[in-house]
């Protein structure tokens, strides 16, 4: 399923820390910005996944998602659970890197460089609205195209049309907003097939940055409780998804901590 045109974070000098068998890349936001530039400039085909609580829980159950994250150029810690788990396991991750925050930071960082961005995903009209808001906010920002895919799988002809549209736009970075794990699987399937240097899956960033959904207050974000805000404000689907994933994640972390503290052995970084 996955392509091999990309490489893991080790190539970029980033330490990958094992958390319950999943390898998570450890670096700060400031360290990440120039690395994203290098990925664009290398033109090898890279993709970056942001591992939030939901994706973490899904990976614990599904080997396919583990493979997708294993093959990601970087798997970054989006979820607060990963930060807590890494500290309890004795090897703390450097910084929590949340998709919408990284997106905004990189757009601002890359605007003076003339980077060309494409927005792929969101409900109808969301990507265009996001483009309008961001280009008004960030001087020099270049968003060269948007596309809202249907909920069904694309036909072979449609896939070809999307590939041509993205490549002809001259995009260097695709921001993918399909929700996890759909966006991560999409990136793994298309890296090396669509000739764009870098893809990043940022999920809910499309809703937040278009202004169609309200993000948690800053204090809630800093406390790592954004998942609770989403459960309370974004409807039954998000509520029940988190209600299912949180106990599994918590159980897996406790089990791993006990194994490490009692047995002195930890599960290896399966995503290296």
Image (tube, grey):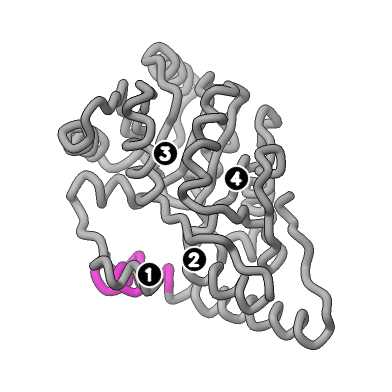
**Residue 131 in view, yes or no:** yes
Q: Nearer the viewer, mark 1 or mark 4?
A: 4
Numbered circle sitting on residue 62:
none
- Examine the image and state in which quarter residue 115 appears: top left
Numbered circle sitting on residue 176:
3
Residue ID at (38%, 24%): 113
Residue 145, horizontal then vertical, whole percent:
31, 23
Q: Which of 214 and 245 lies nearest the eye of the viewer? A: 214
Question: To which residue does mark 2 refer?
Answer: 53
Relative vertical location of residue 181 with respect to residue 87 in this rendering, above or below: above
Numbered circle sitting on residue 74:
4
Q: Which of 222 and 244 lies nearest the eye of the viewer? A: 222
- Span of residues in magenta: 228-242
Task: Mark 4 or mark 2: name the one nearer the start of the chain.
Answer: 2
Residue 93, horizontal then vertical, whole percent:
59, 63
Q: Residue furthest top?
A: 168
Cβ–Cβ under 8 Å for marks 1 and 3: no
């Amino acid at each position: 399923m996955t392509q091999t045109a990309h490489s893991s974070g080790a190539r970029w000098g980033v330490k990958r820390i094992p958390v319950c068998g999943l390898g998570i890349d450890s670096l700060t936001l400031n360290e990440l910005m120039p690395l994203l530039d290098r990925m664009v400039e290398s033109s090898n085909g890279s993709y970056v996944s942001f591992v939030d609580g939901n994706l973490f829980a899904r990976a614990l159950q599904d080997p396919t998602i583990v493979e997708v994250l294993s093959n990601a150029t970087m798997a970054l810690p989006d979820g607060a659970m990963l930060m807590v788990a890494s500290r309890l396991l004795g090897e703390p991750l450097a910084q929590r890197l949340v998709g919408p925050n990284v997106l905004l930071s990189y757009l601002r960082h890359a605007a003076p460089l003339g980077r060309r961005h494409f927005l792929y995903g969101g409900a109808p009209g969301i990507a265009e609205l996001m483009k309008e808001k961001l280009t008004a906010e960030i001087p020099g920002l270049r968003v060269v195209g948007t596309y809202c895919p249907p909920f069904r799988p694309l036909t072979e002809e449609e896939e070809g049309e999307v590939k041509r549209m993205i490549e002809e736009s001259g995009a260097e970075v695709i921001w993918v907003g399909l929700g996890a794990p759909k966006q991560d699987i999409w990136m793994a399937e298309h890296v090396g097939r669509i000739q764009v240097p870098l893809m990043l899956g940022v999920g809910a960033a499309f809703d937040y940055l278009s202004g169609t959904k309200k993000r948690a207050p800053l204090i809630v974000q800093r406390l790592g409780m954004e998942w609770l805000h989403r459960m309370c404000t974004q409807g039954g689907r998000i509520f029940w998804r988190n209600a299912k994933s949180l106990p599994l994640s918590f159980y897996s972390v406790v089990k791993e901590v006990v194994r490490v503290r009692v047995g002195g052995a930890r599960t290896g970084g399966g995503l290296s």
